[in-house]
Image (tube, coloured by chain):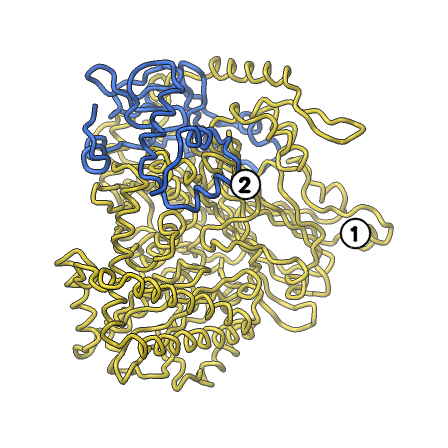
Amino acid sequence: MQDKAPHPMPYRDRLRASEAARETTGCYDGVTSLSLRAADPLKFETLHTKLRSFCVSAREMARRISASPGVREVGEMVVAIYTPEGDAVALSNGIMVHVHTMSRFIKWMIEQGYEENPGIREGDIFANNDAFIGTVQVPDVMDVVPIFYEGELAGWAGAVCHELESGGITPGGDVCLAQERFTEGLFVCAEKIGSNDEIRRDYVIRCERNLRMPIYWVLDEKAKVASCIDMRENVKRIIDEVGIEYWRQVTKEFIEEGRRGQLARTQQLTVPGIYRGHTFYGHVTEGKPGFQPLGDSNWLYAIPIEMTVETSGKITMDFEGTQSWGYHSMNCTPAGMDGGMFVTLTQHMNYEGLVNDGAWMATELKLPKGTWTNPDNEFCATATSWALLLPAYGVFQRLLSRGFLARGFVEEVFVGQVNSPMIEMGGESQYGTQFGMAHFECAAAGSGALAIKDGLDTAYVGWNPESDMGNMEIWEQNMPMLYIGRSILPNSGGAGKYRGGCSFLSTWLLHKTQHLRLVTSEHSSRVFDNAGMCGGYPAPTCQLHRTVRDTNVAEVIAAQKPLPHGIGLNPERSTIEELIEGDHETTEGPYISSPHVAGDIFSHAYNGGGGYGDPLERDPAKVAYDVENGFVTELQARNVSGVFVTQDIESGDWSVDVKVTAKARQKLRANRRKRAVPVAEWIKSEGNRVAAKDFVYEVRRMYQGGMKLSPRFSEEFRAFWSLPKGFVFEDEKAPKRKKM
Amino acid sequence: MTNYSQDVIRDLIAGELPWHQTKRIMSAYKDDDRFFKVVAVLQDRVTWTEQILLPIGEHLFIVQKGKTRITKCDCGHEFGDYKKNWKLAANIYVRKDKRSLREIYPNSDLCHPDWMELREFICPGCATLLEVEACPPGYPIVHDFQPDLEGFYRDWLKTPLP
């Protein structure tokens, strides 16, 4: 797909020389000593702090130019300053995953000979949202501008916004129905979109004519370019002060220091060794409208990770044993995988400020070719790659945390992030105009627990540490839906000595629209895509969608009867079913259906985090607090933590029944002894099931795919279950499905 | 250099340190002697005498027992050679039907037992729930952590292994 580059270019020569120097010396660009830092550490640190403040202020300024509630309210933006070779020197807060993906974009242009054609000149603006060049998914649109100083390339300034609408086959940004690249939306493939600091009018026209809601994308472009110009001019002022030679050397030393810092931090916080973990993700599209019959309609992905920490401090992550890319929207490119690694490191190991591409250079990713982590087909779609990427990096967080725990840094142990399924929508807005939008309240999931406290409720996502769900009133201005409920979902955090953070559930009443398409695809189907740790349980993340059409809402409101504000606690019959008459539907996994109209009701739940430690060790007082505040129900408190609580009728306060709780806990512990069997016994009986391949098609298919792509996984699988050498899962045809 | 008393570390591990102090520890530079203090606190908590070499879970440790190194629960139950997966010497209860899953998740939407089961690894000594694996049926049990004990003590702690 990529054209061969024309003639060798000085920028490309410089890039390759830099990479060769790193290869030879092990240090960034061959910088083996931090001489500027040694000579004047104050000047060195002051300059780095200034660069970081340029980034932070440029992003804040740009957020006020944007029209998108995703950027304005939720902060879906990041900016960074790069070396001429495209390595990040300093960055802002925000969606930091893209700091490294932008690096790939710049390097790609240099490698492709952009210096000659289309040319790299002062005032040029380049944009990209092609994941195989360097981003995660189509809505992550990045702009970079070169920084020239006295005619020489001195660096780059870059900015990324997550667009709320990208013009794909289904509305919104995370285009769930994209099964190939050609349905993902508007691609801008490392394109020069402006010169002389001005975005080309023809590019804007292309955006205006190919997007459902161009105001978001186009104003975000202006915001990004403004932030890049702001950073560029600040960098030029800095170079005026320190001189170009100092600038060139100090930026390299910043990155080398970042690399060394990462290695040192690994040595300080973890224990060398091999760490292993896994999670799984289910994707059921069987019988759903719109999906082309290009491959399997149902997928079960295994995401096993082996992390090796060497005594040098280097971290290597190996994804061997996972499955192939597929005709769905969840594939990820190495750029996205790198970005996931980078953003995780910034949160867990590089939290002191000197964060740059050096951290990434102290790590290695092994992404088996042909798997979803490294597709060998560039036609595949990556529009919802977060669906697999987030659970994968949740595993990474747990693996790192095992190291923190072993080293004694219990306050850093974190059970990890979960998926944050986003709602995409489009059609007729409440103003009677055409629109499209991604609803970014998903940026506030429950977090995994810590080893010393509960997870955060509705306040964390891995991809943006500035988690924020945004105000309901702001979202209501941008979509034809009114909130009739936004509330904590009880028991949505995984149980444990410390429970996972709870998620929330939103319930909407559609209004003033006769055509609203609602699409969401990033909930795992049939498997929880997270885990607990040290005895904690996973959070229940197979959330279903509950909708009602042809409702009697108008009559209910006229009669001043209660409206449903959530789904309630009965898993067999929701509060919506109890209070509203109409055509009720409950849907697993991706939600894609015919358009909705005013009067319909739609509910969508986000995910809580996994728990830590044995729930029988949970402080009963914490359980009473949880029940009182709606985080946990009495039933779960009794069943899982063995805690009985009572409510004082007069004061309304909840308290623990200490005696009954002590007895209940003894009983639960005795019950464990009674029904558990030695693992060796279980392996013997379960081994017969494995030998008979007595699993549903999707499970067999998962094993077949993993074994086909990974000899190591095959050997380990056979060895674990004592299976003969030639044991394999055959490549079989999918069973007949419901009609599409 | 940052440094905390053993009492502070004990309260931190127990989750009993006031939040403002915990937060300060989280935000400060890390204390380089943490490992030794944590091991000392943990050693104080157990009733047995074998030396703790490395904590590997909320209740599990690699300890020196004579000339061997084994995985041991704080209750005293021994799981054998630390290089072998301790889970293989544990007890297990598998939640693989709707009824048993409902015990844990009374109102939530459930995973499908054909696609996923919950495996609870339980200490044969004290019946503590040590780990939970959530995976499809047939997935091999995971060996969570194989530490490089020698490298850790030699290169990072600069202390000989006992």
B162 relative to A528 in the view: left or right = left
Mark 2 / mark 1, whichever is N-terminal: 2
Is the residue marked by circle 1 packed among few (<14), some (14-19), or many (20+) residues within 10 Å?
some
Compared with B124, A133 (above or below) is: below
Examine the rendering and report whether any part of residue A392 can be seen.
Answer: no
* Residue at the right extreme of this rendering: A559
Q: Quadrant of residue A662?
A: top right
Identify residue for label 1. A552
A202 relative to A565 in the view: left or right = left
Instruction: Give the x, y percent position of residue A534.
Output: 42, 30
* Mark 2 element type: loop
Amino acid type shown at disc 1: Asn
Which subunit holds the residue at mark 2? A
What colour is chain A? yellow
Amino acid type shown at disc 2: Gly
A581 relative to B3 in the view: left or right = right
* Mark 1 element type: loop
CA distance for labels 2 and 1: 35 Å
Q: Quadrant of residue A134?
A: bottom left
Examine the rendering and report whether any part of residue B124 can be seen.
Answer: yes
Identify residue for label 2. A501
Viewer-nearest residue: A579 or A562 = A562
Viewer-nearest residue: A410 or A62 = A410
* Residue at the left extreme of this rendering: A24
